Amino acid sequence: MRNFTAVVERDPATGLLVGYVPGFCGAHSQAESLDELNANLREVIEMLLEDGEPRMDAEFVGTQNLAVA
């Protein structure tokens, strides 16, 4: 079993949750709930992995909180 980190945002225009795996081209989806989004992302990643090992364009490192005056 492999683990991937997904970034999740809410689209202000549609209200949908949008998720993507940073650096993994094509690994993105959207849904109305987190459960649905997780299922969608798993399905997309499984389909992409059928083509072989992904070439990751970037490595997710983390998030930062920035204070701006």
Image: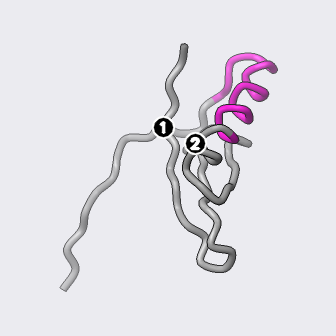
Percent of width and height locating residue 61: 37, 41
Q: Is residue 64 magenta?
A: no
Q: How many marks?
A: 2
Residue placed under numbered mark 2 in the picture: 21
Query: Mark 1 falls on what kind of element?
Result: loop
Q: Looking at the image, what colour scheme do you see?
A: one colour
Q: Is residue 48 above or below residue 21?
A: above
Q: Secondary structure at mark 2?
A: loop
Q: Are marks 1 and 2 in contact (CB under 8 Å)?
A: yes
- Kind of residue at badge 1: Thr
The quarter of the picture where residue 23 lies is top right
Q: The magenta stretch spans which residues?
A: 40-55
Q: What's the residue type where badge 2 is placed?
A: Val
What residue lies at 65% left-to-right and 59% top-to-bottom? 32
| Image quarter hosting the N terminus | top right
Q: Observer-nearest residue: 33 or 22?
A: 33
Say which quarter of the image contains residue 12: bottom right
Q: Is residue 38 left or right of residue 49?
A: left
Which residue does the numbered mark 1 point to in the structure image? 5
Percent coordinates x, y for residue 53 in the rendering: 68, 18
> Which residue occupies 73% across, 22% down?
49
Residue that sits furthest to the top in the current view: 1
In the rendering, at what x and y percent does residue 10 appear? Answer: 55, 67
Residue pictured at 50% horizontal, 50% vertical: 7
- Residue 63 drawn at (x, y percent): 33, 52
- 15 to 22, vertically: above or below: below
Q: CA distance from mark 1 to mark 2?
A: 6 Å
**Mark 1 burial class by Cα count in 10 Å: few <14, some 14-19, many 20+:** few
Residue at figure coordinates x 53%, y 39% from the top left: 58
